[in-house]
Image (tube, helix red, strand yellow):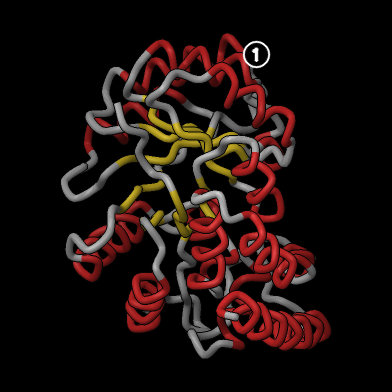
Amino acid sequence: MARQFRGTGVAVVTPFFENGKIDYGTLEKILEYQIEGGVDYIVSLGTTGEAVTLSSQECLEVFDFTKKIINGRKPIVAGLFGRNDTAALIEKMKEFNFDGFAGVLSSSPSYSKPTQEGIFQHYMAIEKVCPIPIIIYNVPGRTSSNVSAQTITRLAHASEKFVAVKEASGNVVQGMEIIKNRPDHFSVLSGDDPTCLPLIACGGDGVISVIANAYPDAFSNMVHAALNGNLKTANQINTALLDLHQWLYCEGNPVGIKGAMELLGFGKRTVRLPLVQLSETNLLNLKNEMAKANADLKKTLIETVV
């Protein structure tokens, strides 16, 4: 089987007006910006999309709006998070309309801190009711429970419905272990932008990205260059963006990337409590670093062409 979800996926932000309501006009502009920038697929309501602070009805509305705007031009992955209750996620999936989605992204259970066997059984339970491909989302910084390389490859071998992992542990060694032991149909995707290039160099298949919200063309070009074996160009782009990452996470995600989107003219940097918007001090730091990155990217483009 060919591996699915290779290349650049972007975990799209959910823009809000200053009053906290969803800004669908800006969301449409962001989605068009992603398509124009050359991303390979869209992830709707991942961590960066703030799904956990949206109501169930708002989530459905964002999904429907995203499908309407994309209109089949790119595959769409739906973020369906289990949090800490397997049974609740199963019921959610039984009621969900999967039409128009190429796959789902589902994180391991949070708060409960299950054993590896518990995580395995959780995913096998949702595999039975989910009719479309599943991307395992390993994000121990949020769940407080790492999904080990052994558990991920065990799931991948147990069912071809598990088509990929978004590996956001930041542990490249763990990523390499998954790459070594995965079945042929299974993609390994970086869920941590700064480690994207090294993971691809080790045999990974791409990324589900945060920074691509702001830099869809540059980051997609980096990923595609790396996948095509052009590590020189990939490294030039990666180096141009490298110092920017810290300012996107200095007050948490999606706080930083929403600051970047405001600076680019894509709505306000508003987030919902318990998050608070990026401080003025760090907004200025981010602005300065984006200016440096833009200059470096321009230079990189000239050097690449020459």
| Residue 210 % position (x, y) | 57, 61
Q: Is residue 96 left or right of residue 20?
A: left
Question: From the image, which quarter does the N terminus lie in?
Answer: top left
Above or below residue 299? Residue 22 is above
Q: Is residue 59 left or right of residue 255?
A: left
Among the 4 quarters of the image, the one containing residue 169:
top right
Question: From the image, which quarter does the C terminus lie in?
Answer: bottom right
Above or below residue 18? Residue 43 is above
Q: Which residue corresponds to mark 1?
A: 115
| Residue 233 % position (x, y) | 62, 64
Residue occupying the point 44% across, 58% down: 54
Residue occupying the point 61% across, 84% down: 302
| Foreground pick, 87 / 158 | 158
Residue 22 in view, yes or no: no
Above or below residue 174? Residue 277 is below
Among the 4 quarters of the image, the one containing residue 103:
top left
